Image (cartoon, rainbow, N blue to C red):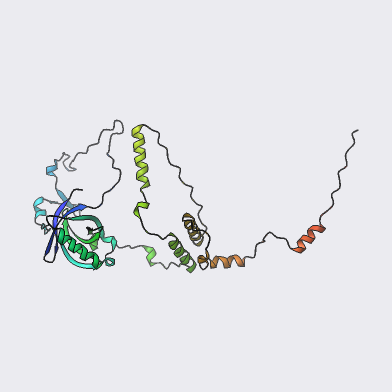
């Protein structure tokens, strides 16, 4: 990995020099825009919509459009006067409980490596922070943007996670939140049973990006001149008649997928409503005849008379 930034963690009067590395990378398959006929790369020109002239990159500036349509043009000198920290410090502001930081604020993750004899203070703060069960709330300026961030420990390394500002989090203003949606106790119990049936320890390696793998296979096949075969999709299960039936079927399917079949006594409370309805509709025949039915059957049995053979003329 190559570091993208060098600075220092400022922790009280302690300074810990660090290098910053991107902790994640996108594995998306990237494409170029090409001419369908011959595969040539498509180039784009920077053309001004006012004068129609092609503009050199050196003459391109940043513009902010006002509500009325006017554009405010900003130069490098305008940005130089802004109060963006250039001290290359990761300033520790406070320490907070992990569950007090909503994951929706997290933006991007970085690894921090000790630099220039910073091993001992790095390990000291790392061990102290890990044993405290807290995260450090910090402020840092990366990529021309000042951000709040948290410092936590993962696999013995500090992870810096930049955060969005509070006014960048949208409010979920949806109509259903104001509606009085009724959920039956049987449905809630069955949904809880489904969650318990599917519960397990999370291991990211158990999952894969099936779309990316299929796309890569298509690219490799076309590059080698082989025929591309589409995988057969599994048949979808028929839709359930109601929510409770769908939940019950989901629980059974989850149990089968885990090999946990047999005892379903734990779901009696959730299915009590359905059982009551079935009982009120009358008992179904179990396929056995009563003694009276057997007697009637014997009386109604008639003797067969042999058919007469016709003589030929």
In the rendered structure, the answer to whether residue 255 lies left or right of residue 178 reads right
Task: Count numbered badges in the picture.
Answer: 0
Q: Pinpoint residue 148: horizontal percent, then vertical percent.
A: 20, 61
The single residue placed furthest to the top in the displayed view is: 38
Residue 227 vertical placement versus 171 (above, below): above
Q: Position of residue 50 (x, y in %)?
A: 17, 43
Taking the image as drawn, is residue 77 in sight?
Answer: yes
Most foreground residue, 38 or 69:
38
Q: Residue at x 13, y 56 (%)?
A: 7
Q: Residue furthest front?
A: 120
- Expressed as whole percent of the image width and height from the top left, the position of residue 32 reads 27, 39
Q: Quadrant of the C terminus?
A: top right
Towards the viewer: 245 or 204: 204
Q: Position of residue 255 (x, y in %)?
A: 48, 58
Name the one closer to the observer, 58 or 221.
221
**Does residue 169 appear anywhere in the picture?**
no
Q: Residue at x 35, y 55 (%)?
A: 203
- Relative placement, left or right, of 301 versus 190 is right
Give the residue at x 36% y 39%: 217
Q: Quadrant of residue 147?
A: bottom left
């Amino acid at each position: 990995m190559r570091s993208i930034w060098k600075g220092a963690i400022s922790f009280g009067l302690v300074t810990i020099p660090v290098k910053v590395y991107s902790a994640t990378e996108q594995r998306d398959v990237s494409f170029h825009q090409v001419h369908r006929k011959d595969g040539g790369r498509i180039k784009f020109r920077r053309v001004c919509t006012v004068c129609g002239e092609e503009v050199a990159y050196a003459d391109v500036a940043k513009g902010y459009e006002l509500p009325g349509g006017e554009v405010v043009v900003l130069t490098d000198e305008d940005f130089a006067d802004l109060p963006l920290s250039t001290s290359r410090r990761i300033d520790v502001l406070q320490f907070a409980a992990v569950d007090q930081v909503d994951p929706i604020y997290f933006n991007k993750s970085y690894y921090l490596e000790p630099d220039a004899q910073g091993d001992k203070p790095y390990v000291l703060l790392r061990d102290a922070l890990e044993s405290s069960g807290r995260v450090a709330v910090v402020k840092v300026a990366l990529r021309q943007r000042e951000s709040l961030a948290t410092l936590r420990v993962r696999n013995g390394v500090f992870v810096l996670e930049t955060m969005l500002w509070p006014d960048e989090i949208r409010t979920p203003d949806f109509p259903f939140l104001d509606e009085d949606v009724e959920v039956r106790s049987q449905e809630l119990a069955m949904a809880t049973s489904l969650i318990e049936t599917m519960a397990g320890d999370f291991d990211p390696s158990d999952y894969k990006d099936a779309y990316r793998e299929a796309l890569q296979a298509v690219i490799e096949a076309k590059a080698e001149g082989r025929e591309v075969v589409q995988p057969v999709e599994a048949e979808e299960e028929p839709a359930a008649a109601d929510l409770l039936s769908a939940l019950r079927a989901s629980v059974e399917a989850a149990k089968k997928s885990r090999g946990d079949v047999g005892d379903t006594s734990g779901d009696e409370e959730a299915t009590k409503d359905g059982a009551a309805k079935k009982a009120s509709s009358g008992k179904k025949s179990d396929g056995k005849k009563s003694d009276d039915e057997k007697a009637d059957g014997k009386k109604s049995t008639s003797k067969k008379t042999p058919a007469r053979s016709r003589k030929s003329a």
